[in-house]
Image (spheres, rainbow, N blue to C red):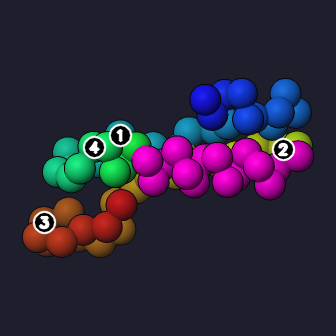
Amino acid sequence: LISTLIKESVKIQLDIDENLPDVLGDEGRIEQIMTNLLGNAAKFTEQGTITIHAALDGDPDDEEAFV
């Protein structure tokens, strides 16, 4: 679905930290959020690069960490 929205002049770049811990959450909702974000990026990007960046924000030993 998303691949049909992305123009040939747009590249997708993944920047995912290899040290990210496993995340517990609703897989369906996370997929829906990522699909919406990527869909919006594709809709408003005529050319260039869409970068998906995921990294840990905070101390990995804390109970709460944000990705």
Q: Secondary structure at mark 2?
A: strand
Q: Which residue is mark 2?
A: 48
Q: Which residue is mark 4?
A: 27
Magenta-drawn segment: 32-46
Mark 4 residue type = Glu
Q: Residues within 10 Å of mark 2 (few under 14, many from 20)?
A: few
Say which residue appears at 80% left-offset and 54% top-offset: 44
Q: Secondary structure at mark 4?
A: helix
Q: Is residue 6 left or right of residue 46?
A: left
Res 18 label:
1
Marks 2 and 3, the one that precedes in the sequence: 2
Q: Is residue 51 left or right of residue 20?
A: right
Q: Is residue 11 visible to the viewer in this orientation of the structure?
A: no
Marks 2, 4: nearer the viewer: 4
Say which residue appears at 73% left-offset and 35% top-offset: 5
Marks 2, 3: nearer the viewer: 2
Marks 1 and 4, the one that precedes in the sequence: 1
Task: Give the CA separation, mark 2 to mark 1.
Answer: 25 Å
Marks 4 and 3, the one that precedes in the sequence: 4
Mark 2 residue type = Gly
Check the picture and name the quadrant holding the N terminus: top right
Task: Give the CA separation, mark 1 to mark 4.
Answer: 19 Å
Mark 1 residue type = Glu
User: Quarter of the image holding residue 48?
Assistant: top right
Marks 1 and 3, the one that precedes in the sequence: 1
Say which residue appears at 73% left-offset and 45% top-offset: 42
Task: Give the CA separation, mark 2 to mark 4.
Answer: 29 Å
Q: Is residue 35 left or right of residue 23?
A: right
Q: Main secondary structure of the magenta part?
A: helix
Q: Residues within 10 Å of mark 4 (few under 14, many from 20)?
A: few
Q: Which residue is mark 3?
A: 61
